[in-house]
Amino acid sequence: MAIRFAVPLAAFILTLSGAVVVNAEPAAAAVKPPANEDCLACHDDVGKPFASSIHEAASCVDCHADLSTVQEFPHSEKVAKVSCAACHDEIASQYRDGIHAWAKEKAGLKMAPSCADCHGRHDISPKTSATSRTHKNNVPATCGSCHEGLAEHYNQSIHAAVLKAGNAAAPTCADCHAVHATQRADVPSWRLGVAAECGSCHADVVDSFRRTFHGKVTELGFTRVAACADCHGAHEILPASNPASMIAKDRLVETCGSCHKGANEKFVQYDPHPNPRSHARSPLLWWINQFYTVLIAGCFGAFGLHSLLWFRRERQEKRRS
Ligand code: HEC
Ligand code: HEC
Ligand code: HEC
Ligand code: HEC
Ligand code: HEC
Ligand code: HEC
Ligand code: HEC
Ligand code: HEC
Ligand code: HEC
């Protein structure tokens, strides 16, 4: 009896599910997004760059999302702008906080960069790839496509020279400026932060800078006092031995004089990077430091010896009594 019922029941269930499948088929077909080949049939120029990009495994309509429901070609002429935020939401939210998004969306500056202006469209590659627009060697040119004058200054700097010589330890635009949450250069917190950024590579010099009046006040948050870039420049940084450098001997009066009215040859002999541990750099400071060290050592030594003798005498007296 169980079998007698079981067979028609199974048949019934099969029919039912079959019906569901049959009913579902047209619905599934209605939302099946176009394949990349469908798009490439007309846009074959996109195929080659796309095949070697980091997004190669994505489908066209992952980015061109409004075309994902298109069933008949040609599609409408109006295609929505691509939103990279759909997948890179963290970086997109940093970008929204930055000056570039503000300039583009709030101030209506059409020439401010969107993601694609810095990264490309169909040929995007990670920064580790030598041909990427965001590879360290190429960042100055990428930013320089708009900030042309600054990139020219940068290209004449010691930092650019070191980079061109193949030393990736040199900074580019991306080391000193946040590339996504880019801030205006006159934001105080950023200006103060740059000294720390220079310091991530020039630790000694920052140490000595902190000891000076300029450094102490900068640390307290007074941005009008000289920070690294006020004396060295930001993009045109050169060693003191180069006559074009802001810290070249012949230019110091001008550099310091921009804040210290009436600065002269004598005034600029003040060392902004005193180092008491270096005799060659700061001989007077070195001697003072030596004297101080000897004095401290002498004081504590004498104090220790005095205590030791005192204890000895106390014990001797105890034994005697
Ligand atoms: C039958 C040919 C054809 C197919 C298939 C096709 N397109 Fe197009 N597409 C065009 C034409 C024509 C234009 C307008 C002229 C131009 O910009 O090339 C266009 C324009 C575009 C634009 C630019 C719109 C603008 O604002 O400038 C995008 C983006 C685009 N297509 C994406 C796609 C994607 C993604 C697919 C696949 C889902 C696709 N197309 C499939 C013919 C086609
Ligand atoms: C990673 C995202 C992404 C993917 C994936 C992508 N595109 Fe695009 N595409 C863009 C961006 C960004 C633009 C520039 C317009 C914009 O910002 O909306 C663009 C523009 C286009 C244009 C306009 C003409 C041009 O070259 O600028 C066409 C046509 C197009 N895409 C076709 C395709 C096709 C075909 C595919 C799949 C092979 C594809 N796209 C995949 C991001 C993408
Ligand atoms: C002003 C130019 C610029 C803009 C605009 C920009 N990027 Fe970038 N992006 C860069 C640079 C340069 C790097 C490499 C940074 C580095 O060297 O650390 C980068 C790195 C990345 C990375 C790799 C992550 C990493 O840290 O290695 C992703 C993903 C990315 N950007 C996505 C986006 C998206 C999405 C947008 C838009 C919301 C965007 N970018 C806007 C310049 C830009
Ligand atoms: C459909 C989701 C999706 C969209 C939309 C998308 N991406 Fe990506 N993107 C990815 C994935 C996934 C990876 C990581 C691939 C990998 O690591 O192999 C990636 C990687 C990247 C990288 C390299 C990251 C690295 O580690 O260096 C960059 C740069 C990037 N995307 C930029 C963009 C930009 C710019 C846009 C908009 C034009 C965009 N992406 C749109 C999914 C997306
Ligand atoms: C060594 C660090 C450093 C590097 C590398 C660097 N910048 Fe700057 N940038 C600064 C500092 C510091 C300021 C603030 C300058 C000032 O107030 O005088 C600044 C200011 C700016 C400004 C604001 C305008 C101005 O002149 O004050 C822009 C735009 C800018 N930088 C873009 C770039 C670009 C593009 C690159 C790469 C070609 C780059 N920066 C490389 C540190 C750097
Ligand atoms: C497509 C053009 C374009 C590209 C590429 C671009 N920028 Fe900008 N940038 C702008 C515009 C437009 C502004 C806003 C106008 C202004 O205030 O100077 C701006 C503003 C800035 C500012 C603030 C300037 C200020 O007055 O304080 C900095 C810093 C900056 N960009 C750095 C960069 C860096 C670093 C890169 C590369 C990673 C870069 N930009 C790439 C167009 C661009
Ligand atoms: C008040 C002006 C001033 C300020 C502020 C300043 N410097 Fe200097 N810096 C100089 C002068 C002048 C020299 C050259 C001294 C000499 O003759 O060696 C110099 C030398 C240097 C040198 C090369 C010499 C060496 O000892 O390696 C580096 C690197 C340097 N500074 C980095 C920095 C950094 C980083 C900051 C910020 C933390 C900074 N400077 C702040 C004026 C300044
Ligand atoms: C990513 C690391 C890095 C950052 C950040 C950086 N530098 Fe440099 N800097 C270097 C390297 C590498 C050299 C070349 C080697 C050397 O002489 O120390 C150099 C050279 C210099 C020189 C010439 C030194 C000399 O021999 O006379 C000065 C001055 C200087 N940097 C100042 C700065 C200032 C100011 C900042 C911040 C606005 C800064 N640097 C940020 C890596 C960096
Ligand atoms: C961006 C502006 C600026 C630059 C550039 C600058 N300074 Fe200063 N400096 C200050 C300010 C502000 C003070 C605070 C004391 C004051 O009011 O004079 C100060 C303080 C000093 C002091 C100690 C104050 C005192 O009178 O005892 C000396 C010494 C000094 N600077 C030397 C220099 C030398 C040398 C240079 C060039 C290598 C230089 N400064 C470049 C702004 C600057």
Image (tube, rainbow, N blue to C red):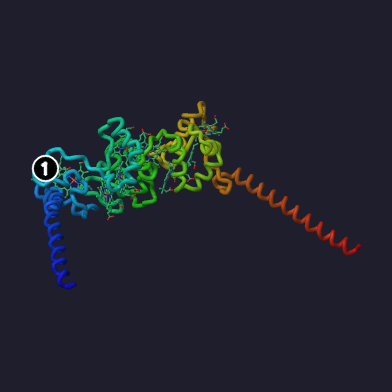
Residue wearing tag 1: 75
Q: Is residue 95 left or right of residue 83?
A: right
Task: Please tell me in which quadrant of the rendered image residue 317 appears.
Answer: bottom right
Which residue is at 34% across, 50% downward?
165
Relative depth, front residue between 274 and 269: 274
Mark 1, secondary structure of its residue: loop
Residue 264 in the image: above or below residue 133: above
Task: Please tell me in which quadrant of the rendered image residue 73 appears.
Answer: top left
Q: Is residue 100 left or right of residue 52?
A: right
Q: Quadrant of the C terminus?
A: bottom right
Q: Quadrant of the N terminus?
A: bottom left
Q: Is residue 150 left or right of residue 22?
A: right
The 10 Å Cα crowd at callout 1, few under 14, some 14 to 19, many 20 or more, is: few
Relative depth, front residue between 14 and 34: 14
Give x and y (percent) for residue 109.
Answer: 27, 31
Q: Which kind of residue does numbered mark 1 sit on? A: His
